[in-house]
Amino acid sequence: MKKIKCNRFILTLCITLPLLAGATQCSSRSSADAELNKRKNIEFLTENGNRSEVHTTASHLQYQVLAEGAGNTPTATDFVTVNYTGSLISGQVFDRGEAIGFPLNGVIPGWTEGLQLMKEGGKSRFFIPSDLAYGEKGIGPIPPDSALIFDIELLKIGR
């Protein structure tokens, strides 16, 4: 039997339709929502990438330098300490942290790449495509195929 995700309003249908329709009826709404979300996020990144203050890397990570740092630049294997705020393109904040330390190669690819473009003391805004974040699955409050926006201040490199 296929595992399906059902909207609460159509729960009754999800009990009977999987046997009749191969479980596709109950997942069609969430599939449609995911596709709409994906399109909105692609449109946002396309428009955002046209702004003169936004730079785009080969991987399609977009970033805006808010304040240049004067210190060193981290490598992917460095331990870094940052302040950050993460939001969806709607502006909904889903996470924030102050003086949070972690190995740079232990986070989403958009962070690993973006922080290597910064210097200690710098502040940047990352616009991270879903494939450099949580992709098709999403996580917690982050829907599938969501582009993410992070304001990040690189406080220090090393422990």
Image (cartoon, rainbow, N blue to C red):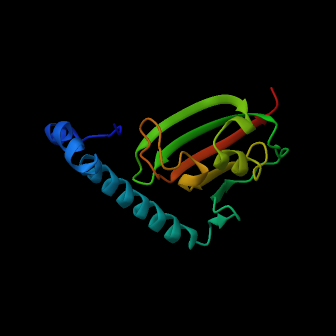
Q: Position of residue 131 (x, y in %)?
A: 57, 53
112 vs 157, nearest the viewer: 112
Does residue 106 lie above or below 29 as drawn?
Answer: above
Q: In the figure, is residue 106 to the left or right of 27? A: right
Please report the residue visible at 56 percent of the width from the left and 56 percent of the height from the top: 129
Does residue 45 lie above or below 131 as drawn?
Answer: below
> Could you tell me which quadrant the C terminus lies in?
top right
- Identify the image quadrant of residue 4: top left
143 vs 29, nearest the viewer: 29
Please report the residue visible at 66 percent of the width from the left and 38 percent of the height from the top: 107
- Identify the image quadrant of residue 112: top right
109 vs 20, nearest the viewer: 20
The count of marks equals 0
Q: Position of residue 124 (x, y in %)?
A: 65, 51
Q: Position of residue 1 (x, y in %)?
A: 33, 36
Q: In the figure, is residue 19 to the left or right of 86? A: left
